[in-house]
Image: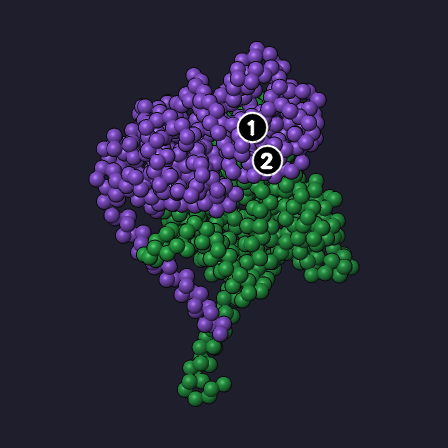
Amino acid sequence: MENIQHRFGAYIKIHWKTIVFLGVVLITIGLLDQFVDSYIRRLLNLCAIYTIISLGMNLVNGFTGQFSLGQAGFMAVGAYTVAIFTVPIEARATIFYLAPMTPLLANIQLPFIVALLLGGLVSAGFAFLIGGPCLRLRGDYLAIATLGFSEIIRIVFTNTQTITNGALGIKSIPTITSLWWTYGIAIIIIVLMILLINSSYGRAFKSIREDEIAAEAMGVGLFKTKMTSFMIGAFFTGIGGGLFAALLGTVDPKQFYFTLTYNFLLIIVLGGLGSISGTVIASFVVTLGQEWLRFLDEPMAFGLDLPIFRPGLRMVVFSALLMVVVLFYRKGLMGTNELTWDFIGKKIKVIKSKFNRKKSASQGGDNK
Amino acid sequence: MKKMLVLLLSLALVVPMVAGCSGSSTTAEDSDVIKIGVFEPLTGANAAGGELEVDGIELANQLRPEVLGKKVELVVADNKSDKAEATTAAARLIEKDKVVAVLGSWGSSLSIAAGDVVKTNEVPAVALSATNPQVTAGNDYYFRVCFLDPFQGTVMANYASKNLNAKKVAIIQEVSNDYSVGLAKFFTDAFVKLTGDPNAIVATGNYNTGDQDFTGILTNIKATNPDVIFAPGNYTESALIIKQARALGITAPFIGGDTWETNEFITVGGADVEGAVMSTFFDDTNPLTEAGKTFVAEYKKAYPDRENIPAVTALGYDGYMMTLDAIERAGSADPKAIRDALAATVDFEGATGMITIDANGDAQKTEAIIKVVKDGKFTYLDSVTVQ
């Protein structure tokens, strides 16, 4: 018992402000869920899903320091598990109109939450299978191997027509519209991540990131620890992929090109490799930012008919903004810091002291 | 310096926000305007196709800018050839821009992704060149102006069996492309039925989008010695297949679907694609209807430097015109009334032929155009009527 407490969460003091903050967040979600239109709802849902998937990726890339690019593959596994097991049985004949679904699966329908968890578990299972050979590789080689895995998954799903319906994809997946599904799961996963990172496992992850040899010398089992991180990351990603399928209501292999992984790589680098709060912030910034810049695609953006305002401009501007952010914040928005109350307090102090200095400087006439 | 930049950047972000907000709020209240959403991939992998459809829609909009005494405004939303983006783009058109109908999208899977959005928001959508049956299946709010994969598969099977007297056919399909897989399947069904021979398809080869080398598939096919090779799929890969087949000494004619009809097909294939036959929606030298003649004349006026008219542009034109016709018959710009009017479309004269919408929301078309590559040009060969 003591051991368990020692491993998980013994070092986390829950500040009263945290509880108030969580309360405010929950009430906000409740209000948003009641009052926003389906467009905003869809965007907010995407933000939460991208948060979940990016957290899974940051656990491996940011906290454990293993450069893995298999995110799209794990997402595909989660998404297809949810799709296959939640599509209404009566709709299956019309969806699988080229080749009927295999009789092994054709009559199994699971509740959404069960399918979602199963998606996460299957995804973690795949992580176990490919982690064995791949995690012995380091740096670029691991990246290449995991990238290869995600492409293999996509090609396999394209060809297993009786299970995944091949290139036609699966549609009519019962959709989630409430914000509670995505945000509820996102909050649970954020809490799990915080507990995990502050446990002895989390410290082992970070020690591997800092120096593998030193970590091994201190008694951290490299392979086992890397595998744990890889599987947990894949589990989160699988869950995120399942939610993604349920949000869109349709999956097909083309969605899961390896370029999808770069979306999440962008989010974790922008937020800060090794920062949970940074990942959350960056998920919102990237998802909402791209959508908000859409006005640049309209020909009459500023009431003037300028020829440069045409579809595609927003992506140019978005990339330029990203470059600026990365230039000024080398380690991402948050670096490896977390948005704790101490951190906020310190920042406020810094701003205050700067302000005071300016004031005194202008009063005293000191131009330094 | 750093502060200056941060200030400038934040200014750059805030100013457009204000501009964007004021812009959208004034037009939303403007009731003299009927808004129609154009939902197309304008960036990403499918951008070329999306552009062609938008050309057709804009041309139609110039010709007929008003309905019910109100100005029609097109709101273009880019779906980035990406499914997640497609659903938000469609939701944005409906919720933020308050469009009464949506046109698009190029690419069946993008249309399928948006299907759920238009259905729950009860705004009708008209697919222009999305040929996959699943776009309209089980969705009362999605319609289309083009023919479907089953029809096109049947047309080509008829052509192979009757015009080319083929008994044995080999199929090469692009397995990662829903369009190609669907066409291959319906071709197989129709061809087996026509010949009465269950083994009429002697070989099937699969390849993935982006593949470059097809000699393995082609060697297998050569061994079975087919009369005709049916190879629906992307134009670049298909042209490469034909090239490599000729290099291997395969002389059987190649037939395919509407995706072949691009200039790239001829530039990549060169002399080897001479004689390749495909089915398509529209032929600019032989319009089937009066509306088609008007369209061709107007297109030539608008784009005098373009050589031939892409079929999807004609479909874009038809989609817009059919929607406006439905708004006129509905007598109001209420999305539900427009949906009902669209569903009741009978014998609408489009540039690509007469359009009657059936119970599934599909255009009942009975005529397809057969074209052949001749002297480096797509030339009208025949028009086929299949019931």
Q: Badge 2 is on which residue?
A: B269
Distance of label 2 from label 1 (alpha carbons): 10 Å
Query: Toward which corner of the image does residue B197 lie, by quadrant?
Result: top right
Q: Can residue A53 be seen at all in this image of the molecule?
A: yes
Say which residue appears at 66% left-offset and 53% top-offset: A67
Q: Which mark is residue B143?
A: none
Say whether residue B47 is left or right of residue B144.
right
Query: Toward which corner of the image does residue B220 lie, by quadrant?
Result: top right
Q: Colour of chain B?
A: purple
Q: Amino acid at mark 2?
A: Gly
Q: Is residue A328 above or below residue B69?
A: below
Q: Chain of mark 1?
A: B
Q: Nearer the viewer, residue B192 or B309?
A: B309
Asked whether the beta carbons under mark 2 and mark 1 sit within 8 Å of each other, the answer is yes
Q: Nearer the viewer, residue A245 or A63?
A: A245
Q: Are marks 2 and 1 on the same chain?
A: yes
Q: Is residue A221 above or below residue B199?
A: below
Say which residue appears at 49% left-offset and 21% top-offset: B155
Q: Badge 1 is on which residue?
A: B276
Residue A78 x %, y %: 57, 39
Q: Colour of chain A?
A: green
Q: Can residue A162 be seen at all in this image of the molecule?
A: no
Q: Residues within 10 Å of mark 2 (few under 14, many from 20)?
A: many
Mark 1: secondary structure: loop
Q: Chain of mark 2?
A: B
Residue A57 x %, y %: 60, 50
Say which residue appears at 68% left-offset and 27% top-offset: B249
Q: Farthest right residue?
A: A217
Mark 2: secondary structure: helix
Q: Residues within 10 Å of mark 1 (few under 14, many from 20)?
A: some
